[in-house]
Image (spheres, helix red, strand yellow):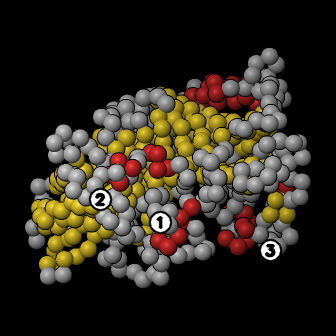
Amino acid sequence: MFLRFWLILLVCFAASTGLGDERFSFRHVANLAKARAAADYESAKALPPVLDGLNYDQYRAIKTADGAVVWENEDSPFQIELLHAGYLFKKPVRINFVSSDLKEVTAVPFAKDRFNYDKLVIQEDFEESDVEGYSGFRIRYPLNGGPMDYDEIGSFIGASYFRLLGREQAYGISARGLAVNTVREDVGEEFPDFVEFWLVEPEQGSGSLRIFALLDSPSVSGAYQIDIVPGVSTDAEIRVKLFFREGVASVGLAPLTSMYWFGENHKERPFLDWRPEVHDSDGLLIYSQNEEKIWRPLYNHFSIRESRYYARNVEGFGLLQRDRRFESYEDLSNPYWKTPTAWIKTLSSFGDGVVRLVELPTNNEAMDNIVAYFEPAVPPSKGDEIDYRYVLSWKLQDEVGLSSNRVLATRVGVVGAYPDTRRFIIDFVGPDLMNLDADAPIFAEITSDANGYITENQCFKNVKTGGWRVEFKLDTDQENSSPVELRCILKDPETGEHLSETWSYQWSP
């Protein structure tokens, strides 16, 4: 087994000078991932102490040297900026470049002359040979201006995290290659790493960038092909093949990670802040198998919360930022109204399973405390393989099309005379709802778990938005300490037709 692993490594090393008549492809990376999974896991070589101990300011002082940006002077539609290892990014990754005809692969060893250390104050020097690679890379593309105005449109750095941007968007939500054993009591979470990348040089005039990536962790290895197409919405078509070295308790496919501190549904917050809302995403949207669209507003509770939505052969899901008004944030330094929606559209069957949402408590905006992904019903065992494809879209202007008759806002307040009673206000908007007169026969179907009691259900036209508003009260037993699952959908009472997406909410005592 060990010999087989190294034979494949030697084949890949030989490909660093040329592939002959063969073209580099996803198959090469999949073979390498399979060989890794058949061998014992080996972690990345440790950084020299001087880089391992860099603080935030020292790391930021390292700049890319003039002339070190890849493809900068080659009339390429894309440019690549390699990033230095150190600070939080302690596991160097190997970087390779592949010729546009896929016949030449060139490894890029770490080199100091790619960086400017002028303002970095360190106590000792280090040898280039002691650093196995880079922390990752940034992608540049002329997205928002003229053909020569290159913007940063994405980055791959840290474990298997990556972020992309569409036109006029600002960084917020992140994606990951894979999630393993996320927030479980029986086993610790595992964070797989992208350990090697192959970036294919785009042909002149090309509007897409192809990246191959190798993922590895103690339990799983994987091959990735990522085709990035920048635009108003930037799309990444992703193919994945996973090989499990060990069985795992749970695995998360197409995971998304975001931040939610507080919003309009969070009036009982125990912390002070001058802004009305602070979040990179404000809800989870799911296309379920029966064509129902489910909207779950996010919340920052005192303890860990999770929700699972059965989603056999799920068509799509994502973390959205629906509130696009500057007045909701009033923050000139952090443009939360411009952070993208990240939407997953499946291209192959994800099988039987659930979309899992995990909400971790936080008392600041620096922590990514929201995780969403698809979790297969049967956890992978040692020797299992999983192959799947999806498109990950980073949206802003066109995100309304994901669900047109939708929830605009969720507000929750305490009923003054009854501190254990909550009043819920839900605003729905959308073209079909806007066209309905105030006397249209619409009703709100509201359901709750057995430990919750719905009273004073009202549904009426909202003259300020043109949509419809639902108001109701929620009571629970005084001894209740369990979350209450709530659902609300607007319906036509005569036909039973659904007129809106389904609002889903978990209220916790």
Within 10 Å of the Cα at label 1, are there few (<14), some (14-19), or many (20+) other Cα atoms? many
Check if mark 1's residue and mark 3's residue have beta carbons within 8 Å: no
Q: Which residue is the site of mark 3?
A: 121
**Residue shown at the point (86%, 53%) measured from the top left:** 68
Query: Of label 2 and label 3, which has the lower sequence position?
Result: 3
Classify residue 409 by image quadrant.
bottom left
The quarter of the image holding the N terminus is top right
Q: Is residue 101 left or right of residue 157?
A: right
Q: Which residue is the site of mark 2?
A: 468
Q: Position of residue 405 (x, y in %)?
A: 36, 49
Query: Of label 1 and label 3, which has the lower sequence position?
Result: 3
**Residue 152 drawn above or below residue 192:** below
Query: What residue type is disc 1 on?
Result: His
Secondary structure found at label 3? loop
**Residue 169 drawn above or below residue 327:** above
Query: Of label 1 and label 2, which has the lower sequence position?
Result: 1
Q: Position of residue 229 (x, y in %)?
A: 66, 40
Secondary structure found at label 1? strand
Within 10 Å of the Cα at label 3, are there few (<14), some (14-19), or many (20+) other Cα atoms? few
Q: Is residue 77 left or right of residue 375?
A: right
- Viewer-side residue, 393 vs 363: 393
- Give the label, 2 or 3, closer to the camera: 2
Q: Is residue 254 left or right of residue 200?
A: left
Rendered image: mark on residue 279: 1
- Viewer-side residue, 273 vs 9: 273
**Residue shown at the point (64%, 27%) measured from the top left:** 26
- Give the label, 1 or 2, closer to the camera: 2
